[in-house]
Image (spheres, rainbow, N blue to C red):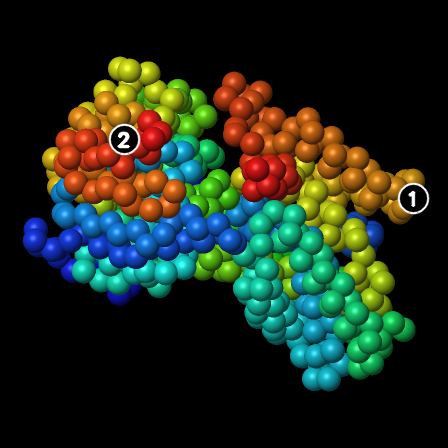
Amino acid sequence: MTTEARAVTADELILDARGITKRFGGFVALNNVDLAVRPGERVGLIGPNGSGKSTLTNCLCGALKTDGGSIAFAGRAIDDLSSYQRARLGLGRSFQLPRPFHSLTLLDNLRIPLVYAVNARGGAHLTEQQIRTRSSDLLGEFGLGGKLHRLPGDLTQVEMRKLELARAMASDPTLLVSDEALAGLSHSEVDEILALLLALNTRGVAVIFIEHIMRAVMAFSERLAVLVAGEKIADGTPKEVIADERVIGAYLGQ
Amino acid sequence: MSNGRFITLACLVGIALVAASTFVTNEYYVFAAYFVLQYVVLATAWNILGGYVGYVNFGTTAFLAIGLYSAAALNKWLDLPIPVLILIAGLLCGAVGLAMGYLTIRLRGVYFTIATLALSVVVQTFITNWDYVGGSRGLYVMRPTEVPVFGSYVAYLFFLMTVLAVAAVAIARVIERSTFGFGLAAIRDDETAAAASGVPVLRLKLIAAAISGALMGMTGAPLPFYLTYVEPTSSFSLAYTVNSVAMPLVGGTTSWLGPVIGAILLGTMQQAMTVLISSSVNLLVVGVLLVIFVIAAPNGILGLLRSMGGKKTDPETNPLAAMLVTEKRSSQ
């Protein structure tokens, strides 16, 4: 595999997306959107429903081809790489609606990224024993240690979110795009997942945090970007952004 | 059980089958057993793409007939020994599987299935118009009455089909427990999530399509010598396609054992019905069973046994049902 990313220093960007444009027929879902993320940074991405957040996620992670612009990850152009190659480079994602491998046990759900992303990345090759240890440790960290051999169908809603995050983390990403990991959760469950995300971040994983729950976004993000109707209308510290008139207008109506 | 042990055990079962066949005096039973073993290979081959990856292939006859006719043609031209013909048919059908996969596997659900059905029609049209193998008139295949070591030719064919069946089941089982097999299961469950976890989705699907096609083609290669007369209508019989889909679904699609159970059960039943009732009720019964299982026991006999054993019901892995759900989802 030649998809190994070179080491990134702190002053370089881990993600540098410029002028991302995506059209579905005549509808412009993303118009010339820039998004840059530094290593280890926590970037919140907000916007009303249909503003293009999930489309942007899909474009960044390779599930959708862009119609314009360029994406660099860890200093290398990834526009021509498919989804699995981006995952192997260290660009992880979790889905808005959890998409577990429902016929595999929790342990085996994590085995997939361990063998297909981590082991395919080159460098140290995980042995069978290491794969088992690493997946059960990771599931333990996410509070799923008691259900290693269960199927995802046995999990509750919040456990499913945890599995989704644990699987994304198993690929050992340097940037995690978390698409609405908190949607539909209760107040205390939100705090629980938020704490997990913060813990991941303290290990050096940069996070793009797409969310509707403003309390969580404000608590989590160091920087906030706002998408409205496919365009980025603001990008700055959370305080600056929520004071921005265009943002207030977009959310409350002029 | 480790792969090594499993393969040894499968070989022992194969040897026992061949040994038992030498004690059978009525050749009909060897013919019937050949028929069942042929379906063990076809069902197992189908399941590698249909069960493990969830791509419902209705083109079994295309692969079988390519194997069959390539063997018949090469036999007429060069008079090669059957094991060589089997290998050539395998390579040829592996390549066809790869090509078909490359052209169609980006299609999802029923669209893929329709494309595989179309492949059968294309191959049938081609062969019906291929004069060298007799076109629609058909072709007689001469076989010697005696072969060294085995004695009768039927015993020799039965031996070859047993080897193929053992090989197919061993391949399916090795795949199932391998990294490759886990990748296929991830694709079956969710292609987008699999890709996001680093699984090279297209590549794995193509490999599965090639292996599945190669095994189906290899099953076809000894068939002209079993039948001694080949012609397009019966070579492209719907029975092959329906059976190779129904057997894994009735047995259970997530394990190598499912297609084996399905093939033995439905294969034996069809042989018995052909003899006792009529050859035309075969497909009717298979069809009825298929419908019953899809509705009442979507995880097949294996799923039923597991739930009876107190295990929680498996998530739905029936590829036919999944295909329709995918359609629904993608149209939302």
Q: Which mark is residue B278?
A: 1
Is residue B43 visible to us here?
no
Toward the viewer: A130 or A224? Answer: A224
In the rendered image of this protein, does residue A150 appear above or below residue A202? above
Numbered label attached to residue B153: none
The residue indicated by pointer 2 is: A248
Q: Position of residue B241 (x, y in %)?
A: 73, 52
Q: Residue at position x 24%, y 34% from top?
A: A245
Which residue: 58% across, 50% down?
A: B108
Q: Is residue B30 left or right of residue A120?
A: right
Q: Nearer the viewer, residue A152 or B219?
A: A152
Q: CA distance from mark 2 to mark 1?
A: 78 Å
Callouts 2 and 1 close, C-beta under 8 Å: no
Element at label 2: helix
Left or right, A101 with respect to A209, comes to right
Q: Quadrant of residue A71?
A: bottom left
Q: Residue furthest bottom?
A: B77
From the top left corner, tell me how far across and down residue A44 is, in percent. Answer: 23, 36
Q: Nearer the viewer, residue B82 or A169?
A: A169
Please, which chain is the residue tagged with disc 2 on?
A
The location of residue B279, given as percent across then percent down, is 89, 47
Q: At 21% across and 35% down in the image, what residue appears?
A: A244
Residue A60 horizontal side relative to residue B59, left or right: left
Q: How many marks?
A: 2
